[in-house]
Amino acid sequence: MPSLTDIAIRHALKRVEMSQKQENLADGEGRGTGRLVLVLKPMPKRVTADWMAQQWRNGKRTKRKLGAYPSMSLAQAREIFKRDFADVIQKGRSIKIATDRRPGTVADLFEGYVASLKAADKPSWKETEKGLNKIAGTLGRDRLAREIESEEIIELIRPIYERGAKSMADHVRSYIHAAFSWGMKSDNDYRQQSARRFRIPFNPATGIPTEPKVKGTRWLDEDEFVQLYRWLECPDTPVHPPYTRAVRILMLTGQRVEEIASLHIDQWDAKEKIIDWSTTKNDQPHAVPVPNLAAELISSINVNEYGWFFPSAKDPSKPVRHGTLYSFMWRQRDRGVIPYVTNRDLRRTFKTLTGKAGIPKEVRDRLQNHALQDVSSKHYDRWNYMAEKRAGMAKWDKFVRAMLAKKRLKAAA
């Protein structure tokens, strides 16, 4: 049978429209193994034309749709059939498991990795997407991901490191390593929907050393805690009010900065005085009762029209970014009006001072939603510890109020 032409297809469409009978147009020879076929079906108002890969296997015929004509042209259908199905048919494999055989580009890799983070509801996907978008242009978005070499990544990171941004250089290396690691696994991951395959022989970022992790030890003592809290209540310089409130809630609850910064009205149970997150950094739901001091502060806040407790000053439709809270604190501590402190230091301060208040470590860990690695906690214990957490926060509330009152009396004297 001769190869198809566009003229032959148009004539066949008219025949089917008139006869109202289905026709199959084969492109060339190949009945013994398989071939490209255009299936024309009469419908009440039109004739559909679908490209099919057809295979004869074990005496049975199997078809798989490639696309619709004319959206997919004859030339495109031939290219896809040759690329994705011809070799599969020749080797006797089923066309049902044939995939897009084009190797993925750098853009495909980065977009696929970010999509996987979004699908897993990872809060880091936005920062990762932003970082990878900057990297993609330098590596070449349209280059095959499998062609990227370690030397290219080194040359990309070195200028960042040399200008003193060591942490950023480490982050860039981490983004690239994670994306390539995902790409290598995705080739064999039957759970993911993307048919694109990357065929990456090795992860080019694996051999690049990371920056030594510096373990933080800084925490605020009682005097410093009060100094910061009082300044946040009445700052001596113009600051977007939601930012100072957000940091006070961080100090009083010990939660992760990203989770407090994006606090929404749907997550606040005013009656029970509980903040409830469906998912968190460790992929676990988390509900924490807040001390009365924090409940009073949260209740005094009028959420904006989008439901955010702490909206961004630049775009009220979005919550403040955790990096913005860090920046505003960084500027104030440089002025000497508040103690030197980072967001992580505040979380560490809560852990330390709640211990001083008499709250057991197990309860403190649960209040801060730290992952518990023992077998009992991971696999068997399903108690929510709400009563214990409430009792712990009541102790902490009493401790903070006494601390603030004591320092105020000292200042008055």
Image (cartoon, rainbow, N blue to C red):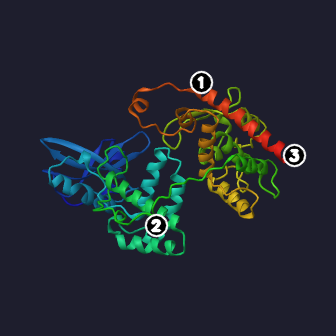
The numbered dot on residue 325 is: none
Residue bearing the label numbered 3: 412
Q: Residue at (60%, 46%) from the top-left corner?
A: 347
Quadrant of res 306: top right
Q: Amino acid at mark 1?
A: Ala
Circle nearer the N terminus (2, 1)? 2
> Where does label 1 land, which residue?
387
Q: Say whether residue 403 is left or right of residue 352.
A: right
User: Which quadrant of the rendered structure holds the N terminus?
Assistant: bottom left
Element carrying mark 3: helix
Residue at image position (68%, 60%) is 330
Q: Quadrant of residue 9?
A: bottom left
Residue tagged 2: 136
Q: Is residue 256 left or right of residue 204?
A: right
* Viewer-side label of 3, 1: 3
Which badge, 2 or 3, is on the more N-terminal residue? 2
**Mark sitting earlier along the chain (3/1):** 1
